[in-house]
Amino acid sequence: MTTPDHPSVHPAWLPDAATAFLHGRTVLVAGDGPLAETVRGEARRAGATLVDGDADLVLRDTGAVPGGEGFVVAHRDGRLDVAADDDAALLHAWFHVVRGGTTDPAGHPDARHEPAHALRMLDHWDNVDVHPVMGQVERGYSGGSIFYADGHVREDLSRVEQYARLLAATGVNRVAINNVNVHAREARLLTDGLPDVARVAAAFRPWGIRVHLSVSFASPIVLGGLTTSDPLDPDVRAWWADAVARVYAVVPDFGGFVVKADSEGQPGPFAYGRDHADGANLLARALAPHGGTVHWRAFVYNHTQDWRDRSTDRARAAYDHFAPLDGRFDENVIVQVKHGPMDFQTREPVSPVLAAMPRTRLAVELQVTQEYTGQQRHACYLGPWWSEILRFRPWGPVEGDDGSPTVSDVVGGAGPGASPQVAAARGGGIAAVSNVGDDAFWTGHPLAQANLYAFGRLAWDPTLDPTDVLDEWVSLTFASPSPAGADRTVDPDVRAALHAVLDDSWRTYEAYTAPLGVGFMVNPGHHYGPSVDGYEYSPWGTYHFADRDGIGVDRTRATGTGYTGQYPAPWRDVYESLGTCPDELLLFFHHVPYGHVLHDGTTVVQHVYDTHFAGVERVEGYVRTWEGLRGAVDDAVFERVTERLAEQLRSAREWRDQVCTYFLRASGVADAHGRTIY
Ligand code: GCW
């Protein structure tokens, strides 16, 4: 289960068996420069023979679209001939062929492929130092950082090179290498850490990936010795211009900055009576001459709310702060919006900010690291969740597909009313928090690799079926050893078992955790495991308001916080009405009695009992299914997954029992099926 470069590291979706079909094939790579060289290196590594003339596979960099990432697959004389727009496209084309698992032209229909989004970015919440509370990787469940050790960037970056290779194979093209909560040590990556940042950038560069840094808005003070970081102060502007110039001097293809400002204690423009557009544009103007962008996060809310204060609704915050600023952000600012209005819950509505800023480049932010979805101890394949989000139509229709714009269209710069600048820039794309650490399996739970893989693939093409994406991942990761040059195969039992465990695992997780979109109910701080009232009297704005009669948050315009009014039609009305609000979001939008009847005819309280018992039974099924793979998959993978599934089952039972008991005690309503509730 190891890779040649790192004997202790799992090869993830690029084991040698995945490329064995290329062994002995002739490959012509026509193109110059480092990326073409990378492709040649991959061909050699796969055991192909590089030739100058006729070949089984021809990959040509046509240079037809400078900076373009698309490529055309065609057949010429019964062989595969791929014409790539530019050098990065050559690399994408190579991995496209690898995914196909065959050089038989019949396996590769003639087509043009290109990414839906120009920016496909992973954000690392890695700290250089080990943070006393959050550890080295904030919300990291895969060990320490692959970038940093012993207080600085690692000497040996071969692991980062392998990571870059894996990411390139999924289509990711940007990586931010440090936490958005920028502590003192990490702030210095921008100054004395630059030679190290340059080394990391060099590790990613051959794989077509550009590096970004998270920066502190207070940098002029903490690094520059100024007395202010007021965005309108000329000295502050000059400081940023110099700081940025120094970055580009050592990293000429630097991507730009990621900024969390005025959020959860991070410094920002509010201290100077300025707004987020002032703050973002300050950095944007420093970066613009060099071609860099600012990813400015919209995750801004009051995290010191008094739970007694029923007038403040955290869900409203991002829209209230950002929607009025539409049109004020510079062209190289991307406002990065969490997919939901709260915080990466297992189920949330799509953020209304995504439908409210047509004159701003928007990126949607997903969370690959499983903070609220089982922390890589639970198998939870998030592809279906992201697919729902990216395909969601903020302007309707509620059901079906009439070609109306989706979230993916919006962040691709093609939403309704998109300004010419937003359209020309193709929006802000897709970003996600990485789930990778220095763990031997990269992601702690070996099956969590599927989430990383699926993120890249869905960012490239959000119309892909997430189950098909999972199948691709299975085919690569669990490829059977095969004779050199033979088409790739996978043991059908392994394939079937992985689908049985993962296809519906997100819905399973939803079933045994917080019900009907109410969210949270997790242990405060670390966010693992059930605690129904854990956040109920906290300052974080995440409440369920359960009492003896009912539960849920009234976010209607009629009687609640008015949050439903942040959506355009039809959703503002669909969510407003109890009759039309989708069941899975019921408690997000409404406070209802326990006896409220859902669309399927069950009451809320009976639904809670039923889903929690069913969810645990499904996990019991996963355990049995996986046990059937003993000997059929790599032993180390088998053992690690077995251990994680045991914990998932323990935890799912804990969730079931705490949530069911809570609802029984609160409502006094017995389970219609008489199951044991404590
Ligand atoms: O989900 C929350 C996390 C924080 C995180 C924050 C954010 C990096 O609990 O750990 O901080 O979101 O997205 O900024």
Image: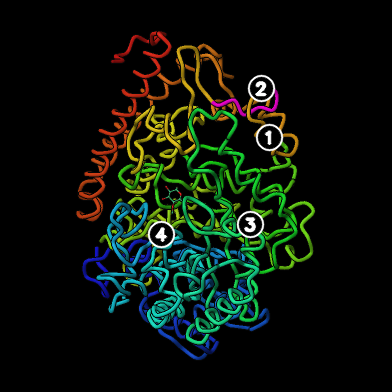
Mark 3 in CB contact with mark 1 (< 8 angstroms): no
Residue at figure coordinates x 59%, y 83% from the top left: 61
In the picture of the structure, the residue carrying the numbered disc 3 is 273
Q: Secondary structure at mark 4?
A: loop
Q: Which residue is mark 1?
A: 399
Query: Quick check: 611 above or below 180?
Result: above
Q: Nearer the viewer, mark 2 or mark 3?
A: 3
Numbered badge on residue 227: none
Measured Cα–Cα span from mark 4 to mark 1: 36 Å
Q: Quadrant of residue 558?
A: top right
Q: Earlier in the sequence, mark 4 or mark 2?
A: 4
Residue 559: mark in rendering: 2
Q: Main secondary structure of the magenta part?
A: loop
The answer to which of marks 3 and 4 sits earlier in the sequence is 4
In the rendered structure, the answer to whether residue 321 lies left or right of residue 487 reads right
| Nearest to the observer: residue 104 or residue 116 | 116
Mark 4 lies within 8 Å of ligand 1 (Cβ measured): yes
Residue 197 in view (yes/no): yes
Identify the magenta region: 553-559
Question: Is label 4 or label 2 in front?
Answer: 2
Q: Amino acid at mark 1?
A: Glu
**C-beta proximity under 8 Å, tags 3 and 4:** no
- Disc 2 to disc 1, how far (Cα)? 27 Å
Q: Is residue 340 above or below residue 22?
A: above
Return the residue at label 4: 125
| Label 2: element kind | loop
